[in-house]
Image: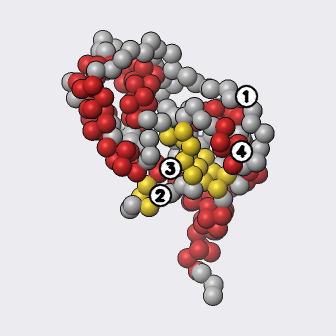
Amino acid sequence: MVNVMEIASELAAYRRRLKLLGDYRESALKAILRTEAIFVHIPKTGGKTVIKDFYGLPQHYWFGHAKPDFYKALLGPRRYRNFFKFSIVRDPVDRCRSGFFFGKGGGFDTEHDQEFAKFVKDMSFDEFILDGHLEQWSDRYIFEPQSSYLVSEGQMLVDRIYYTGRLERLFRDLKMAVPEISHENRSQYKKHKLDQKIVEKIRSVYRKDYEVIDF
């Protein structure tokens, strides 16, 4: 039986692909079609390493931090259904701290990054957490919960989750030679042992992440 809705979705996806800028058609889209693998890139989880080492692309030739719905609309339901969908996750405490220092250092110098850098200019990470600012920023960019990229209506949207620092398994799963992992875009900051109150507050903000991901 012909699925009229699916045919309409495939045609809409085809039109979206035609409208893509040439750089993206020749880089990110072509790489996804070649590997039949869709990478959902969550901010501050080491994803640029995957873009470089797995897809063989310059790190800026990707679809940013697009969520699964974007790929479904771009590729069409048939490809989206059949392609391998994966993401990388990171313990929320470590990710939060990395995101803070990345943002404080100016991030990628976007308007949003400039806004955040100005906001935390004279603020320590401990103050950012204990004074309740994480809650203020937790629905935005660097600090958006990882679960918002992975789960909808209680359903996991990707086929497999990998963990920052353990990307060798990705290459083995796809029966590829394991390269020397490049560790792109690491935040540079001096780590210190976090007070338990800070850890507990971060975990409270990201409680859904801990509920749906096995950290």
Question: How is the protein colored in the picture?
Answer: secondary structure
- Residue designated by label 2: 156
Cα–Cα span, label 2 and label 1: 30 Å
Q: What residue is rendered at 39% in x and 61% in y?
A: 154
Q: Amino acid at mark 2?
A: Met
Label 3 vs 4, first from the N-terminus: 3
Label 3 secondary element: loop
- Residue designated by label 1: 180
Asked if one can make out residue 96 in the rendered structure from this viewpoint, the answer is: yes
- Residue designated by label 3: 67
Please tell me whether mark 2 or mark 4 is closer to you in this view.
4
Label 1 vs 3, first from the N-terminus: 3
Residue 152 % position (x, y): 41, 58
Label 2 vs 4, first from the N-terminus: 2
In the image, residue 110 sits, relative to residue 33, either above or below, namely above
Would you call the spot at circle 1 few (<14 residues within 10 Å), some (14-19), or many (20 or more)? few
Residue 83 % position (x, y): 66, 59
Q: Amino acid at mark 3?
A: Lys
Cα–Cα span, label 2 and label 4: 22 Å
Q: Nearer the viewer, residue 113 or 85?
A: 85
Residue 123, quarter of picture = top left
Asked if one can make out residue 76 in the rendered structure from this viewpoint, the answer is: no
Please tell me whether mark 1 or mark 4 is closer to you in this view.
4
Label 2 vs 1, first from the N-terminus: 2
Identity of the residue furthest to the bottom in this view: 1
Residue 124 % position (x, y): 31, 15
Cα–Cα span, label 1 and label 3: 28 Å
Which quarter of the rendered picture does the C terminus lie within? Answer: top left
